[in-house]
């Protein structure tokens, strides 16, 4: 809208007041997620580049719908009772300019494309009224498009009001239309609830336009999934796959190797360099950026991450709000929690959790460790099972591990604590004080052997 060009005189109405009973959910239908956005947000985003104003008609769960949409320019229109699509559009009429083209969209038809809407609008600019239709293999439930012998649209008949002959028609009304504001107002005022549902049908404006000698431009959408409506969880899953496949196809066209686009999910933005490979069941969330030659193995979740060239993310790893350097390997089964920076040529191995820490270049944390609130220098080796004890039950404390440090396995570093440059910590130590550089420090008890000790023996039973 305000920030979008090109500007045309187009006002949009999105219908979203229905309850969506078939979703069997307490969440408003239009707030169910598709990719990274709710259904309604997809529709708004499709219209935004084209329109000067957007009015959304809300009813059921109206407050939660308003709160979920982060756009101050939306005109929210409240429809108290759902008395039909015609009644819903009527509620938004004060926001429609006579001379503009009014674009009518449904909040539960989320895959509609801006380019399709653009064509629909162009048609309406020529004739005054344009309807988006589609051929459906199974048209049941939808309004049928009635054409005359010259193929001109005459009217739309709802399924519940259709004769057997009309029910056989497979061209259906998608519900999406564009019409000159003045005409819309005129025909809406003439609507009567003379139908099986006792509602004001928006679709009845087609017949009124024909009577008024308006030539309705019809635009048959080639891709039926683009205009699919979401009525239940089956539709939602189907739309999600359509959406993900389209994203995957775009990424592959731009050179990303995706082992199986049916098992690929991106809920946000993905930027990638050359020769990146994504194995099956990887989920990207938020804003992610991959350098060149990044390999992400199966079952990883990558969220708001920046991953450097030649990084190797092994199976079942989770990376969130973090930066991974180049030539670094992560996992398998590693968890990189927010605010972590791992340097170049580093290694975070299996069952390692890192939180809010920096790990320097060439440093290894190879097995079964927890590194939290820590600053780890370069060329550091952290042995298996090392824990930074960063939490005293109330506060979090920092651990500083300088360059070249070697921490022996199964050591606990009780923060706040600093380990000096090139220090070595003996395995099994509990470090409670700062450790000097260049020295070996250990806190374990001396090993003793009891020479006269005998292992207890089981007494033999008399019966055996
Ligand atoms: C409508 C069309 C039908 C078309 C189908 C496409 C009418 C009369 N019928 O039927 O021709 O084939 O969509 O999916 O228009 N809504 C409101 N307020 C209301 C009623 C509906 O906001 O009072 C909203 C709903 O939330 C929904 C949309 O309008 O987003 C469509 O309503 P719905 O009841 O699903 O219409 P259909 O019977 O499917
Ligand atoms: Mg419907």
Image: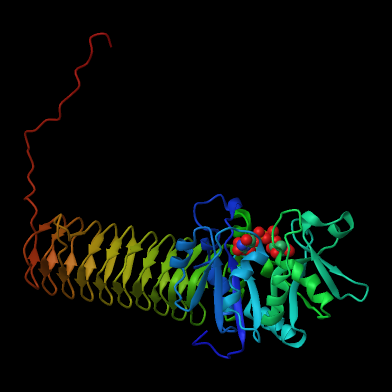
Q: How many tags in the picture?
A: 0
- Work out whether residue 241 or residue 109 is closer to the camera in this orientation and state it: 109
In depth, the one of 183 and 322 nearer the eye is 183
Residue lying at the far top in this picture: please name it: 463
Q: Which residue is painted at 26% across and 68% down in the image?
A: 356
Q: Position of residue 179 (x, y in %)?
A: 70, 79
Residue nearest the viewer, comparing 263 with 126: 126
Q: Is residue 306 visible?
A: yes
Above or below, 281 against 209 in this view is: above
Question: Residue at the spot x=67%, y=81% of the render?
Answer: 181
> What is the quadrant of residue 443 in the picture?
bottom left
Q: Is residue 222 visible?
A: no
46 horizontally vs 344: left or right: right
Res 306 → quadrant: bottom left
User: Picture coordinates of residue 371 (x, y %)?
Assistant: 24, 63
The answer to whether 265 appears left or right of 143 in the picture is: left
Q: Residue furthest bottom?
A: 6
Residue 255 image position (x, y, % from top left): 57, 80
């Amino acid at each position: 809208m305000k920030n979008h060009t090109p500007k045309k005189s187009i006002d949009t109405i999105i219908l979203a007041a229905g309850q969506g009973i078939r979703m069997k959910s307490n969440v408003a239908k239009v707030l169910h997620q598709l990719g990274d956005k709710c259904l309604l947000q997809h529709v708004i985003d499709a219209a935004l580049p084209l329109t000067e104003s957007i009015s959304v008609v809300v009813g059921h769960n109206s407050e939660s719908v308003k709160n979920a949409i982060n756009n101050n320019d939306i005109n929210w229109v409240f429809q108290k009772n759902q008395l039909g699509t015609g009644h819903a559009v009527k509620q938004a009429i004060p926001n429609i300019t006579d001379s503009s083209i009014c674009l009518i969209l449904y909040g539960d038809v989320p895959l509609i494309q801006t380019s399709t809407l653009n064509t629909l609008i162009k048609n309406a600019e020529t004739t005054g009224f344009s309807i988006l239709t589609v051929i459906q293999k199974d048209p049941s439930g939808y309004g049928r498009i009635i054409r005359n012998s010259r193929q001109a649209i005459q009217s739309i008949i709802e399924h519940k009001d259709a004769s057997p002959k009309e029910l056989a028609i497979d061209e259906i009304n998608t519900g999406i239309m564009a019409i000159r504001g003045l005409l819309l107002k005129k025909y809406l005022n003439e609507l009567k609830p003379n139908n099986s549902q006792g509602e004001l049908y928006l679709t009845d404006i087609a017949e009124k336009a024909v009577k008024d000698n308006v030539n309705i431009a019809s635009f048959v959408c080639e891709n039926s999934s683009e205009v699919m409506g979401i009525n239940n969880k089956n539709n939602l899953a189907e739309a999600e796959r359509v959406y993900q496949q389209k994203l995957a196809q775009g990424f592959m066209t731009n050179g990303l190797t995706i082992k199986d686009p049916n098992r690929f999910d991106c809920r946000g933005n993905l930027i990638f360099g050359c020769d990146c490979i994504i194995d099956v069941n990887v989920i990207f969330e938020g804003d992610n950026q991959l350098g060149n030659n990044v390999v992400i193995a199966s079952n990883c979740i990558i969220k708001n991450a920046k991953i450097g060239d030649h990084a190797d993310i092994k199976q079942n790893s989770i990376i969130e709000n973090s930066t991974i350097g180049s030539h670094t390997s992560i996992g398998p089964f590693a968890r990189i929690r927010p605010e972590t920076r791992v340097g170049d040529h580093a290694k975070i191995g299996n069952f390692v959790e890192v939180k809010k820490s920096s790990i320097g270049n060439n440093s290894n944390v190879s097995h079964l460790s927890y590194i939290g609130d820590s600053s780890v220098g370069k060329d550091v080796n952290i042995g298996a099972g090392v824990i930074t004890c960063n939490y005293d039950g109330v506060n979090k404390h920092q651990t500083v591990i300088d360059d070249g440090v070697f921490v022996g396995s199964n050591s606990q570093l009780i923060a706040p604590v600093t380990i000096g440059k090139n220090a070595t910590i003996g395995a099994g130590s509990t470090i409670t004080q700062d450790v000097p550089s260049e020295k070996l420090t250990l806190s374990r008890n001396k090993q003793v052997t009891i020479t006269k000790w005998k292992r207890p023996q089981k007494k033999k039973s008399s019966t055996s």
